Image: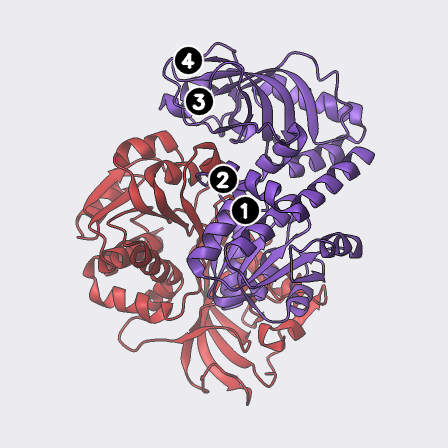
Chain colours: A purple, B red
Amino acid sequence: MSAYGLHRVVDPVGVLPQQADRLNADPVPGHDEVIVDVERLNLDAASFRQLREQHGSGEAVRAAVLAIVERRGKMHNPVTGSGGMLLGTVREAGPDSPLGLKPGDRIATLVSLTLTPLRITDSLADWDGTSEQVPCKGTAVLFGRSIAAVLPDDLPDHLALSVLDVCGAPALTDRVVRRDRASSVLVIGGGGKSGSLSLAAARRAGAERLIALVPTQKEAEALERTDLADEVVIADARDPVAVSEVVNRQVDVTIVCVDVPGCEHGAVLATKDGGTIVFFSMATSFSAAALGAEGLAADVEMIIGNGYVPGHAEFALDLIRAEPGVRELFEARERQTSAL
Amino acid sequence: MSAYGLHRVVDPVGVLPQQADRLNADPVPGHDEVIVDVERLNLDAASFRQLREQHGSGEAVRAAVLAIVERRGKMHNPVTGSGGMLLGTVREAGPDSPLGLKPGDRIATLVSLTLTPLRITDSLADWDGTSEQVPCKGTAVLFGRSIAAVLPDDLPDHLALSVLDVCGAPALTDRVVRRDRASSVLVIGGGGKSGSLSLAAARRAGAERLIALVPTQKEAEALERTDLADEVVIADARDPVAVSEVVNRQVDVTIVCVDVPGCEHGAVLATKDGGTIVFFSMATSFSAAALGAEGLAADVEMIIGNGYVPGHAEFALDLIRAEPGVRELFEARERQTSAL
């Protein structure tokens, strides 16, 4: 079981690293481990929002992140249960590591920070606490079954990291749209990172009617300037009646990419009997989805968006290279975040 | 939208009945509605357990159920978010009801009590508050898109109700095992109601290696007296390492039927890459499943168990008629409950 990092669990002993309260983040590699010199953390959006809401000022958010990592040996937000990912350079690889990484490789981890042993050594001195992307000095540990992508030379780091953070979504969208031979696809939250990548993936997978649902006129306009969707509609994703009305004809596949609670029923109402819904939002409620579909007598398959699909990193990086619309939305989003 | 019962929502207006705080349970049918004279409620297991834990005595549990229904116009446990189902006789059907029911039909509702307008008129005088099955006089409302099954003549009511309560599980198990052409199937919680039906369904769908995981020696012995599983193993489903060890060789399909939190990672570890997990437990955590699979680099499809699959009621009733092992487990369970 060492491939899963069980030996790194301090408390309670015998659970997997993600379930653990505390991990041992000692930067000495086991025989199948890799030690990474961390450069940057990318906090999960739901986690960062919660920290900002709870702590307010950037300074207080920074202190909260340091306290979590100090206590837990990982950046695992105890309220949201979510983490994020990191970027760094391989320092040392154990002799039996199966990841194929060598010292000096610049990588991004594609497993969650909720299970990655992490030590911060610079007190996050270069971060002002107001953005999800956190400059950071420290070390992290990868296990035998971890996943890491070597960073591409042809894309800026911040962009690659931003893409890799959500790369499970387009890969699973591709798989589901092809499997179902879906002709109509709705992406709820189509203007966001995972949403725009999912739109591009659905188009490539052969979908003919692509609908993006967004919350505001401004997001709609940004999306309309790209060719990613055939229809852009505006509604509150938490209002099932409104979603159902703007989507009008039910679709074969619905992809849920908005990180707010309460989007389950709108997705169900928008999807045909026999169709499929993929939930990528960490704010999804299992029971609301299960009982909602039953209560609406909807014969839909509902999939929990798994962040891991083989080849997902390459697939997402390829989309951002090939689809100017996706890149444009990502870059606009970054300009906006840094302007906040 | 009246087929979904929007006109019955009192507060907040404009949401679907399941999301509503309060429904109008007035027993006068709209044009596509059906009014039912209620005989019995079957509370969701998680809801009943929570009520018992919070309120203790049977008398206090009864008062709590009455208070919920009085305030909300539905039996929607505000803590667990779950409901249950009911049994009764059709009193009146509106002229445009598509359900095909007529006055005098004895039925069970297959949509959750969390969205069914309900009025109790006997103060639950015949219930002592110590069992999930609640004798009850009152009225309920079915919408155009509700689902109800006419009760069979050849099975006792309590048994039919108990089967119909979980009939989505075997139907979806059947569909997934056939779709994946799965040869090995693990049912976590194989000794329970949905678990034993799912084992029988998986066998019929062609699975060759059927493993049931149960928590105790006693449950294992009860299951071993039937032919439902090829292997019965004992482990705490919340302990992924233990689950992984007793299952030994990973399976094609895992069905999760235990109503306790924390079973997601064990299910992931027990399932092959390329395999499928169906979560029927309302205690499933969306984020634990999503992040767990990602963190374990597991390429598994994870499905949210939808309680509605067309034909699910007939399918489950047929299983209990044809499979003596399933019926035996159901009846033993009922004897146990009434003995408490």
Under circle 3, the secondary element is loop
> Is residue B309 shown above or below A262?
below
Decide which of B91, B110 is in the foreground and name it: B110
**Chain for numbered disc 1:** A
Which residue is label 1 attached to? A170
Whichever of callouts 4 and 1 sits on the residue coming sooner in the sequence is: 4
Q: Amino acid at mark 1?
A: Pro
Q: Residues within 10 Å of mark 2 (few under 14, many from 20)?
A: many
Q: Are marks 3 and 4 in contact (CB under 8 Å)?
A: no
Decide which of A315, B278 is in the foreground and name it: A315
Gap in angstroms between the C-alphas marked 4 and 2: 25 Å
Q: Which mark is residue A5?
A: none
Q: Is residue B199 visible?
A: yes
Give the image quarter of residue A1.
top left
> Is residue B155 shown above or below A55?
below
Gap in angstroms between the C-alphas marked 3 and 2: 19 Å
Closer to viewer: mark 3 or mark 4:
4
Task: Give x and y (percent) for residue B24.
Answer: 65, 72
Q: Residues within 10 Å of mark 1 (few under 14, many from 20)?
A: many
Which residue is label 4 attached to? A94
Under circle 1, the secondary element is helix
